[in-house]
Amino acid sequence: MKLQVFRLPVALCCLGSLAAFAQAPAAKVGTVSIQQAIIGTKDGQKAVQQLQTKIEPKRKELEAKQAQIAQMEDQQRKSANTASADTLRKLATDIEQNKKSLQRMAEDAEAESQQEQNKLLNELGGRIMQVLDKYSRDNGFTLILDVSNQQTSPVLWAANGVDITADIIKLYDSSSPSTMAPAPAAAPAAKPAAPAAAPPAKKVPGAK
């Protein structure tokens, strides 16, 4: 009898908890790709163009260095049976030094590019977050999950209807006038200078 009296309040507590859970409002959850939202805005697209323009000279420099190494390696193969041992040894050393130089150049270029990308994300990310905060409050969202990085994101699956990335891009562009300067236009190719006119020939004394 005592055992039954002890169980009754526990059962009532459990029923009360289930009832409270059933009456609680359902959480509204959405997903967003912050990186996609940033580069999808007009400001983001301009910033990406500026970044590409800025790193283009470095990319061409790396390509030229690779072409130089390929040419030296081709020379090494062609002269393998004809050049002296000292010549081949010097050529191999030069190739190795150029490869190390190329590696350092590539690492520096990658670090510079990553730094510029982080700067872009920091500059536009703050404004995107303000838009995201307003949108989430206005539409009654309880939780927004960032799915930009699939390796670290806890979201394994989500219905298309909960993705608000396109809405954030649209709201940003409509509420925030562009503050990014347009990408600089490529400088026109310089025209070759016209050849200078030849000076008039001097008459040699005594010549007819």
Image (spheres, helix red, strand yellow):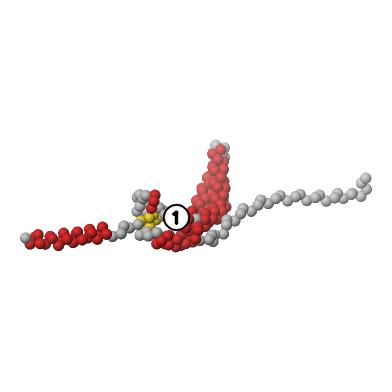
According to the image, label 1 marks what residue?
A: 167
Seen at 57% across and 46% down, the residue is: 68
Q: Nearer the viewer, residue 190 or 131?
A: 131
At 18% across and 61% down in the image, what residue appears?
Answer: 13
Report whether residue 17 is seen. yes
Residue 59 x, y percent position in the rendering: 54, 50
Whether residue 108 is visible, yes or no, is: no
What is the three-letter code of the residue carrying label 1? Asp
Can you name the residue that lies furthest to the top here? 81
> Residue 144 versus residue 101: which sits nearer the camera?
144
In which quadrant of the rendered view does residue 146 lie? bottom left
- Quadrant of the image containing the N terminus: bottom left
Work out which quarter of the rendered image holds the C terminus and state it. top right
Q: Is residue 84 left or right of residue 29?
A: right
Task: Name the residue located 39 percent from the left edge and 54 percent from the top edge.
Answer: 31
Q: Is residue 46 left or right of residue 7?
A: right
